[in-house]
Amino acid sequence: MQKILDIISKKMEQAFVAAGYDGAYGKVTVSNRPDLCEYQCNGALAAAKQYKCAPIQIANAVVSQLDQGDFSMCEAVMPGFINLKLSDRFLCDYLEGMRTAEDFGVDKIGAGLTAVVDYGGANVAKPLHIGHLRPAIIGETLKRLHKYLGYDTIGDVHLGDWGLQMGLIIAELQERQPELVYFDPDYTGEYPKESPFTLLELEEIYPTASAKKTDPAFAEKAHVATFELQQGRRGYRAIWEHIMGISLPDLRRIYGILDVQFEKWLGESDADPYIPAMVQDLKDRGIAVQSEGAWVIPVAEETDKKEVPPCILVKSDGSAIYATTDLATMVQRMQDWAPDKMLYVTDKRQNLHFEQIFRAAKKSGIVKETTVLEHVGHGTMNGADGKPFKTRDGGVLRLEQLIRDMTDFVRAKVVENKIVSEGEVEETTAKIALAALKYGDLSNQPTKDYNFDLERFAAFEGNTGPYILYTIVRVKSILAKYGAWEHLPMGLPANVYAKELMLAITKLGPTLETACRTLSPNLICAYIYELAGCVNKFYHETRILGEEDEALKAGYISLIGLAKNVLETCIHILGFSAPEKM
């Protein structure tokens, strides 16, 4: 379905041509003076120089060629602006098209294309902390957005499950329980199915081991254990499997609370088998060169305004690093899925790393030249005071605790205000808390830092998730009282508030496309906040269920029903849903 701006621009281009001017001057934009008009065209000002006549003369000639049935106002004003307001019939017909079309007629710009979204970045054996919130929910939203726009989407958590942290755990476990059969190099039997540690014990083992990295002897033991694990030592592989078996269910549980769903739970270990052949190929083709004992891929370009160091492929001691694994992961993804686009959602402080990786991937031919590679670098979440978010003892707050704090805060409000019956408290609380948490984050530009404010994010008024939910629930209540409404045709806008709401609905497609192109979920938040405001203004200024004219009432119901459906679609993309009551 064509976007409404494209339709109006096409009509304007035809009017320019009919008046004897180049149709390229007929571009129409949303008015920057909504008090004067809804849309505007400034093409006559630009055409004046080419045609050597006054802009107002051109504007008047163009206006005379426009179909007056499409506009309730089309006028030329000095010095040569063309101001437009859509006719009620034109707008009604357009919204009826949206109402009856699949997915509101939004263009499937990704049809036939595959997008991989690499997000989450969880490390096995470590609990998720607040730093994992932003990549999880930004990545989930971008994945859902791409899917809605027609892409075949694959979300991959890309676990950190193969690095030094594994060697640290193995080394610490050996110091504590050297008698375990896993450490006997001559053992050939079956290893125990039951893990030698619990999740709580594992979460204590890792930080203890990590704190010992400054001890040269322990650090060496951990590095050797990492190397032997990666080389396939049976006992260490068995310990690794225990770690994975204990950690993954807990990670899935917490991501599940956030309604973050990965299509693939792959990790660095899955990319490891691709590394030897990839490295050898890059050496053989001269893509990788030696530098101070290491193998690197030079990626600097003449146009660089700052230094871009070579991408290190293999360190001087022969070991692989993150860059090696990331490139091998690309090899795996290209072989398995041949994606047209790969998005990486991580902290923006990794910008240089991904710049090096992307250039190396293109230079080496690991990905096609046409493959889109984007790093969605996000800012950090700080406390309400603007300082880094810490626990009372100065540690890093666990993500599960942050979710619990928000849930407890919202539950208290739900119970105090008696929003729902006792039996509905928990389900309603969970939905409102998730909306507050996600919207509070996503409404900020991804690259910006923001302050986490429990009270502000959970407020039922203002630019918040609960306010959006409240708007949806209010409309649901009206629709339930009316009865069957799903097939009611769109009516003409009966007042200015109805028209404002209709115009807001038409912005859905352009908003989603722009959010996808710029990788900015905050644009969707801004859109639904505007749309919810229009819904509430229309509700307050219009007698909907009390309208005596049944045809007029049906038009009202159809309009707010469409608005509700659009809002629900958008919050699904953002990763939350509305309760039945609020």
Image (cartoon, rainbow, N blue to C red):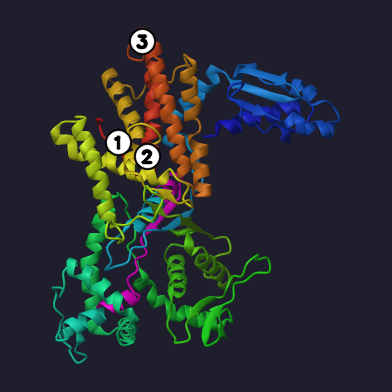
In the shown orientation, is residue 167 left or right of residue 539?
left
Residue 114 in the image: state x and y as whole percent.
Answer: 46, 55
Q: Can residue 520 be seen in this view?
A: yes
What is the CA distance from the residue labelled 3 to the residue labelled 1?
27 Å
Question: Circle 2: is it few (<14), some (14-19), or many (20+) Cα within 10 Å?
Answer: many
Q: Which residue is drawn at 39% across and 58% down?
A: 119
Q: Quadrant of residue 22?
A: top right
What is the CA distance from the residue labelled 2 to the residue labelled 3?
30 Å
Look at mark 2 in the image and give the residue it sits on: 571
* Residue segment shown in magenta: 142-169
Q: Is residue 184 above or below residue 269?
A: below
Mark on residue 547?
3
Look at mark 1 in the image and give the residue it sits on: 578
Residue 449 in the image: state x and y as whole percent.
Answer: 45, 51
Q: Which amino acid does label 2 sit on?
A: Ile
Q: Verify CB contact (< 8 Å) between mark 1 and mark 2.
A: yes
* Label 1 or label 2, whichever comes before in sequence order: 2
Residue 164 in the image: state x and y as whole percent.
Answer: 34, 77
Mark on residue 53?
none
Question: Circle 1: is it few (<14), some (14-19), or many (20+) Cα within 10 Å?
Answer: many
